[in-house]
Image (cartoon, helix red, strand yellow):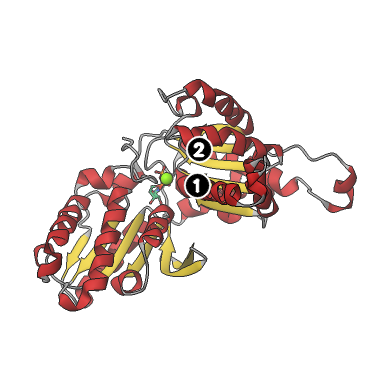
């Protein structure tokens, strides 16, 4: 009898991981299994802890559920595990967001509040922005947690202090151990209480096995195909399955600025679009940033040759490539013509030259093995 069967109800994440291993989507990895066991613990406790209800009105607030902080080098499966957990956890008040995007939202909300009538008094802006959050989340999953600058560092302690005090559970992925966060940063001592609380509120789970699975996926793989027709498309189909470990994927959506951007196919951290989906619709810089936070590999099919008739689409394509490049998102694409024939319009020649040079770099082994970075200015984590 495998341990999996023994644990039936108590090990939903381990079971889900085992199922992916058994169908060949993932390789068996003991450290990932250990992390899954920890996520099982979080999930079981979250499903158990009653909140509200008749009894809840009289009982004191339940013990908050300790979260998890998955840490390790790139390509170890941290995001994959967190997403698996998020997908399975049976509570409605949950949110999964890129850390950088979450902090951006908080800064915007605080600025708004300060401008408001209320905020001009001495009301606490942090309390004001966390209050509406608390109605919506009991579980907050944060991808690529990091402490980058002093503004974020100062905000973190107060913000998360209030979220934790209100019983929110945090599950995060990061390249940096809590004790190394904001290392050598200015006024680092101010961040130490936050680090101590982070360690008290989350179990730190190390995922530092020898295998960089992302690197394996791209090894020996041509990420660009050229030409049009069924053969090129079939090549892209094969490449897609390689990126997802054989999962066809399903449609999804990405919410951006109150709108919804349809994602034709997504699976295992990758998304698949046609050129028209992304560049012939009125999408802008913010949408592309959202996209590069949500996925670490993007497939774009049927990129055309750019002539004078496609000025808007070509501008969007250049912006998209810049955004993906800055954040280390991996790109697989099919192009109608070779890269050096892509730009046919003299007006955008210079911009195109830069775009093509980035495209060339983005197929290099080095780029494909590097980290996905949430923040454009982040130093590359190797
Ligand atoms: N055990 C595994 N076997 C095969 N592929 C894996 C395994 N774990 C993760 N992957 C894949 O490797 C890539 C990198 O995983 P990811 O979770 O994004 O890593 P991290 O967040 O640690 O950088 C993803 O495409 C993921 O689906
Ligand atoms: Mg990740």
Q: Which residue is denoted by mark 2 in the rendering?
A: 70
Label 1 lies in ligand 1 vicinity (Cβ under 8 Å): yes
- What's the CA distance linking mark 1 and mark 2? 9 Å
**Mark 2 C-beta to ligand 1 under 8 Å:** yes
Residue 174 in the image: state x and y as whole percent.
Answer: 46, 38
Q: Nearer the viewer, residue 362 or 260?
A: 260
Look at the image and tell me in which quarter the N terminus lies: top right
Residue located 48% across and 48% down the image: 104
The residue carrying pointer 2 sits among few (fewer than 14), some (14 to 19) or many (20 or more) residues within 10 Å by Cα, namely many
* Residue 343 visible in image: no
Q: Residue furthest top?
A: 189
The quadrant of the rendering that contains the C terminus is top left
Judged from the image, the secondary structure of the residue bearing numbered disc 2 is: strand
Image mark for residue 370: none
Question: Closer to the observer: label 1 or label 2?
Answer: 2
Q: Residue at x 63, y 45 (%)?
A: 120
Picture quadrant of residue 146? top left
Which residue lies at the image location 67% right of the left edge and 43% below the top edge? 121
The residue beneath circle 1 is 81
Please name whichever residue, 110 or 253, is drawn nearer the observer in this view of the structure.
110
Label count reads 2
Sequence-wise, the earlier of marks 1 and 2 is 2
Residue 130 percent coordinates (x, y): 64, 46
Q: Looking at the image, can residue 176 be seen? A: yes
């Amino acid at each position: 009898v495998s341990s999996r069967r023994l644990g039936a109800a108590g090990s939903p994440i381990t079971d889900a991981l085992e199922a992916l291993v058994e169908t060949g989507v993932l390789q068996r990895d003991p450290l990932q299994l250990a992390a899954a066991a920890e996520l099982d613990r979080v999930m079981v406790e979250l499903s158990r802890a009653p909140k509200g209800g008749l009894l809840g009105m009289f009982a004191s607030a339940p013990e908050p559920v300790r979260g998890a902080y998955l840490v390790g080098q790139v390509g170890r499966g941290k995001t994959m595990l967190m997403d698996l957990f998020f997908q399975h956890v049976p509570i409605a008040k949950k949110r999964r967001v890129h850390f950088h995007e979450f902090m951006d939202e908080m800064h915007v909300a605080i600025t708004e509040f300060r401008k408001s009538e209320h905020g001009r008094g001495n009301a606490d802006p942090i309390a004001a922005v966390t209050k509406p959050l608390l109605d919506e989340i009991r579980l907050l999953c944060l991808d690529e947690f990091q402490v980058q600058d002093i503004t974020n560092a100062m905000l973190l302690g107060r913000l998360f202090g209030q979220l934790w005090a209100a019983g929110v559970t945090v599950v995060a992925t990061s390249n940096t151990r809590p004790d190394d966060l904001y290392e050598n940063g200015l006024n680092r001592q101010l961040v130490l209480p936050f680090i101590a609380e982070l360690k008290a509120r989350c179990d730190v789970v190390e995922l530092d096995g020898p295998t960089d699975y992302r690197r394996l996926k791209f090894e020996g793989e041509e990420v660009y195909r050229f030409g049009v027709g069924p053969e090129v498309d079939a090549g892209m189909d094969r490449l897609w399955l390689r990126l997802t470990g054989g999962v066809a994927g399903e449609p999804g959506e990405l919410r951006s600025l109150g709108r919804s951007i349809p994602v034709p196919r997504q699976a295992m951290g990758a998304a698949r679009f046609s050129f028209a989906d992304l560049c012939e619709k009125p999408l802008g810089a913010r949408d592309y940033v959202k996209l590069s936070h949500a996925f670490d590999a993007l497939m774009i099919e049927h990129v055309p040759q750019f002539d004078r008739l496609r000025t808007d689409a070509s501008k969007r394509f250049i912006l998209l490539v810049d955004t993906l490049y800055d954040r280390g998102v991996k790109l697989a694409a099919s192009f109608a013509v070779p890269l050096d024939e892509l730009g046919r319009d003299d007006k955008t020649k210079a911009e195109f030259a830069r775009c093509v040079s980035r495209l060339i770099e983005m197929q290099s082994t080095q780029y494909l093995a590097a980290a996905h970075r949430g923040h454009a200015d982040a130093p590359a984590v190797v």
